[in-house]
Image: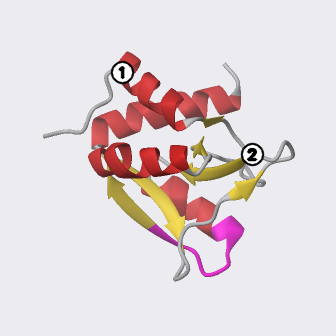
Amino acid sequence: MSQSGSQAAAFFRDVRENGVVWLVRNDEGSPTYLSADGTRSFPFWSTSPRAQRAAKIWRRGLRVDSMPLDTWCDLVLPDASRDGLVIGINWSGPRLVGWSFTPREVLTRRAITGFTPRP
């Protein structure tokens, strides 16, 4: 399995177990990133330490924040879909690279893997 593949697998496992997703933000909001093909990604991580590494690499006054999984699925993913964004999953490494999925693919993966918020 590739590094990006193992990071994606870890994302879905961790959020299933913890019921939380992590993001980086500053006072202006959360950054999105434009890929070479023109697709804009909105990145998320499955643990606080992963998101903290991203904030440290990207700097710009970014801090780590968490969001309940159900809020992410019910509000953020539909908004991202409407805005034409893809979802970066556990980007890692010195240049923060990894896989991105459409919001629909994330929700499909959710159905396949059974990742649901903990009660």
The location of residue 45, given as percent across then percent down, is 50, 49
Image quadrant where one finds the C terminus = top left
The location of residue 10, given as percent across then percent down, is 49, 33
Image quadrant where one finds the N terminus = top right
Q: Residues within 10 Å of mark 1 (few under 14, many from 20)?
A: few
Please name the residue that numbered disc 1 is placed on. 111
- Of mark 1 and mark 2, the one earlier in the sequence is 2
Q: Is residue 21 above or below residue 58?
A: above
Q: Residue at 32% across / 45% down in the picture?
A: 74
The amino acid marked with disc number 2 is Thr
Pair 1/2: label in front? 2
Please name the residue that numbered disc 2 is placed on. 39
Give whichever of 116, 18 is nearer the camera: 116
Does the magenta run of residues contain 63? Answer: yes
Magenta residue span: 56-64
Q: Residue at 42% across / 52% down in the picture?
A: 76
Q: Is residue 27 left or right of residue 40?
A: left
The amino acid marked with disc number 1 is Ala
The location of residue 16, given as percent across then percent down, is 32, 34
